[in-house]
Image (tube, helix red, strand yellow):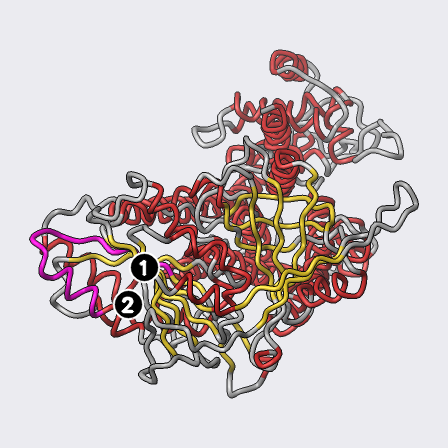
């Protein structure tokens, strides 16, 4: 709360500076610039801005300006408003605090000594010591020019605000839609059918069969990218069209501006200002959408990777606006002959720095680089973003639009502070690391799995499908890096007396491979860790009439948590409950059972139907019918080894290295699980299973809600998404509703 209050105070202070450059300030600035045409008998200090300092600190100049404003005030630029803006400008730019009362007295006093140069041909314009009556026709022309100038600045901010409102209203509407869908408020079959049609046409489909699985242009690896969903595409198209309209419309120019000259120069300046300010207005959205603690995920019900997609496209719009801003402003400076002089000014140099960082961020964020060296990308991304914001701040610190930068930095700081709070809540814990190696016959088809078991504080609560960021406090494991993993919390589901969260890591390449290599080479079994989280959308799958869980490989923790939570939401072991939960798990070989056996066995005597498909391994059953039976005496007694190694304890300079080996046969585990788990050799037919469930629901007398959770390889998840969208596009969907929940997060 204290941090938020300080942030608000800072923003109000900066907004005061921005208020100077507004349409009602046109008269004040026209009188102020008119005063600069005269030379007063006053020499300002060398380290101040003469434009403001003379006007605010030399009484003849100040009185002349106030008299000018009083003489030309109108409904658009009322005298009181001009006085307020002049006082504000003197306070922030002229190093003097003045009240409106003092300014009015200064104007009245000036009338006693006022000189009119137009009525005195011999008037001495140098070393003035008396108030001067300005050329009022020139003041009016300048006021109109300033009005157009400030009107464009106001439009720039206003249009940026409209895009923020667009996102706010849109996400609230999406949240209402998801809330209505998830809580089965629609009892009408016809309305439910229309809802399903909307989801089939707009919400669910991928753009071109790919979403979580990257698409390649002409098969070239460098041109690989993650494509948005159809709904996300519509949202982004509308946003981009708004941005194009807001940055290209409503420019007002005059024949010959006393400020900028020809219409060509006016367009150069106005487009530069519009795109520059508009780019700033997008910065808070960038940080909010890209942050881990994003309240909009809760409001909208959208997952983290959706906001990352929005984050990417908003950044591209912002970058294009920044490039146009820089290009137009450089041409304007060249047209006015001030380009070389501007090169040496700080505002210009900081603008160059910010633009360079912006372009570098765009290049290093390409999926090709991000996929191959994510941690390097992340460090560079944060560093360049910080330098970019610093450059932006000093680029505009003198003209009053830094409130957008401060708001952005404030959101970034709040996100970081809350991340530290999340880490503090969990505390430093010692994680037990266990490596499960596949059987020798499966080693070429199955990777090892590292199980990370972390003691859980009593006050820390998780939810199904959530993920955490894990920090390994070991210099060899890069303790400064954090890695996202989905967790399984057995305590919340089955009341495990030992509070523990479990993470299952499959070493493939990059970070996970480095963790595995360090564990094996250094004989690690325990390591201090920090846990940040939980994160992710909270889906109440226990509210659905039927729950389908389609899982591939190591994607089991999230969906299994949903199954366990759905069971725990019922009376304990109430197998007669109407609720139906089906878990379909596809694994390469039976070796996968070794690291998830303890979890699966907990589903015994529950209403969860479990089917395990073994795609590459051999069940070696007596019956040769590709289906499992309870007769499994002829299973080969494959021996799987669970090994773990302890870190050396340096506190007493003694090596306490210990190796534990538990010889467990896969046959015994298979035998125990086959009493309630169906094992099938081959690949699951998700379409057939979905049709089977839908046919059952169609026989019901009321609308049946189906929650479908998918997690596994990205291509599998995309296929399931398109499958659900295709099935909902039919006309016979009035009696059921399917909500697809993807647990796989790819960004």
In the displayed structure, would residue 686 be above or below residue 27? below
Which residue is drawn at the image coordinates 49% and 78% (left, top)?
A: 636
Q: Residue furthest bottom?
A: 218
Q: Secondary structure at mark 2?
A: helix
Mark 1–mark 2 CB contact (< 8 Å) = yes
- Binning the other alpha carbons within 10 Å of mark 2 as few (below 14), some (14 to 19) or many (20 upward) gives many
Of the pair 461 and 367, the residue shown nearer to us: 461
Q: Residue furthest front?
A: 633
Q: Which residue is mark 2?
A: 724
Of the pair 602 and 54, the residue shown nearer to us: 602
On the picture, is 312 further left or further right than 392? left
Q: Which residues are magenta?
A: 691-709
Which residue is drawn at the image coordinates 23% and 61% (left, top)?
A: 198
Cα–Cα span, label 1 and label 2: 9 Å
Which residue is drawn at the image coordinates 50% and 42% (left, top)?
A: 154
**Horizontal and vertical percent position of residue 567:** 33, 46
Q: Which residue is mark 1?
A: 708
- Binning the other alpha carbons within 10 Å of mark 1 as few (below 14), some (14 to 19) or many (20 upward) gives many
Q: Residue furthest left?
A: 701
**Horizontal and vertical percent position of residue 106:** 67, 15
Indicate yes or no whether the magenta region holds residue 49: no
Asked if residue 261 shows in the view, the reply is: no
Q: Earlier in the sequence, mark 1 or mark 2?
A: 1
**Horizontal and vertical percent position of residue 532:** 61, 44
- Figure quadrant of the C terminus: bottom right
Residue 59, quarter of the rendered image: top right
On the picture, is 244 further left or further right than 659? left
Q: Secondary structure at mark 1?
A: strand
**Horizontal and vertical percent position of residue 530:** 68, 44
Q: Which of labels 1 and 2 is toward the front? A: 1
């Amino acid at each position: 709360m204290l941090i938020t209050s300080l942030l608000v105070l800072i923003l109000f202070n900066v907004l005061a500076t921005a208020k100077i450059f507004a349409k009602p300030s046109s008269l004040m600035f026209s009188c102020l610039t008119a005063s600069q045409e005269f030379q007063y008998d006053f020499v300002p200090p060398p380290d101040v801005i003469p434009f403001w300092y003379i006007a605010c600190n030399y009484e003849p100049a100040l009185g002349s300006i106030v008299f000018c404003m009083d003489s030309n005030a109108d409904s658009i630029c009322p005298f009181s408003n001009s006085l307020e803006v002049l006082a504000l400008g003197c306070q922030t730019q002229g190093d003097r605090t003045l009240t409106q009362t003092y300014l009015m007295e200064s104007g009245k006093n000036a009338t006693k000594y006022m000189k009119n140069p137009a009525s005195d041909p011999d008037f001495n314009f140098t070393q003035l010591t008396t108030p001067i009556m300005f050329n009022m026709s020139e003041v009016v022309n300048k006021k109109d020019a300033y009005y157009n100038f400030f009107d464009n600045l106001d439009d720039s901010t206003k249009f940026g605000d409209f895009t923020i409102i667009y996102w706010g209203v849109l996400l609230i509407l999406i949240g209402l839609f998801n809330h209505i869908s998830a809580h089965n408020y629609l009892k009408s079959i016809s309305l439910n059918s229309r809802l399903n049609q909307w989801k089939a046409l707009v919400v669910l489909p991928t753009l071109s069969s790919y979403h979580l699985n990257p698409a390649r242009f002409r098969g070239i690896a460098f041109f690989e990218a993650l494509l948005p969903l159809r709904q996300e595409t519509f949202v982004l198209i509308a946003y981009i069209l708004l941005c194009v309209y807001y940055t290209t419309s409503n420019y007002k120019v005059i024949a010959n501006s006393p400020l900028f000259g020809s219409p060509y120069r006016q367009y150069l300046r106005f487009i530069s200002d519009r795109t520059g300010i508009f780019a700033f207005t997008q910065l808070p959205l960038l940080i909010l959408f890209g942050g881990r603690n994003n309240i909009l995920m809760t409001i909208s019900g959208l997952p983290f990777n959706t906001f990352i997609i929005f984050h990417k496209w908003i950044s591209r719009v912002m970058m294009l606006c920044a490039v146009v801003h820089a290009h137009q402003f450089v041409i304007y400076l060249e047209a006015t002959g001030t380009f070389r002089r501007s090169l040496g000014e700080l505002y210009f140099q900081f603008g160059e720095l910010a633009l360079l960082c912006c372009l570098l961020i765009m290049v290093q964020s390409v999926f090709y680089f991000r996929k191959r060296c994510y941690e390097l990308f992340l460090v560079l991304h944060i560093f360049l973003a910080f330098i970019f914001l610093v450059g932006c701040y000093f680029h505009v610190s003198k003209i009053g639009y830094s409130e957008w930068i401060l708001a952005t930095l404030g959101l970034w700081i709040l996100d970081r502070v809350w991340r530290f709070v999340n880490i503090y809540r969990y505390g430093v814990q010692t994680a037990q690391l266990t490596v499960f190696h596949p059987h020798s016959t499966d080693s070429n088809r199955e990777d090892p799995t590292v199980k990370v078991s972390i003691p859980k504080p009593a006050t820390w609560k998780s939810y199904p499908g959530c993920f955490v960021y894990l920090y390994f406090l070991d210099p060899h494991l890069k303790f400064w890096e954090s890695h996202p993993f989905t967790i399984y919390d057995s305590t919340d589901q089955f009341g495990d007396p030992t509070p523990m969260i479990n993470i299952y890591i499959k070493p493939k390449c990059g970070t996970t491979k480095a963790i595995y290599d360090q564990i094996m080479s250094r004989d690690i079994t325990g390591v201090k860790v920090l846990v940040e989280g939980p994160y992710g959308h909270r889906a109440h799958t226990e509210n659905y009439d039927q729950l389908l869980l389609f899982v591939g490989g190591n994607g089991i923790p999230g969906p299994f948590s949903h199954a366990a939570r759905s069971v725990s939401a019922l009376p304990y072991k109430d197998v007669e409950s109407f609720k139906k939960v089906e878990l379909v798990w596809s694994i390469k070989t039976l070796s996968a059972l070794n690291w998830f056996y303890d979890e699966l066995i907990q589903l015994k005597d529950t209403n969860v139907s479990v089917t395990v498909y073994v795609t590459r391994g051999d069940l070696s059953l007596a019956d040769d019918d590709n289906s499992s039976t309870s007769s499994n005496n002829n299973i080969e007694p494959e021996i799987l080894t669970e090994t773990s190694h302890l870190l050396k304890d340096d506190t007493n300079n003694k090596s306490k290295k210990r190796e534990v080996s538990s010889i467990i046969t896969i046959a015994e585990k298979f035998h125990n699980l086959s009493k309630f788990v169906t094992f099938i050799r081959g690949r699951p037919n998700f379409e057939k299973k979905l049709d089977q469930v839908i046919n059952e629901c169609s026989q019901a007398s009321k609308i049946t809600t189906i929650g479908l959770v998918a997690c596994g390889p990205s291509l599998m998840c995309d296929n399931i998404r398109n499958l659900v969208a295709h099935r909902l596009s039919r006309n016979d969907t009035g009696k059921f509703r399917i909500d697809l929940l993807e647990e796989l997060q790819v960004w």
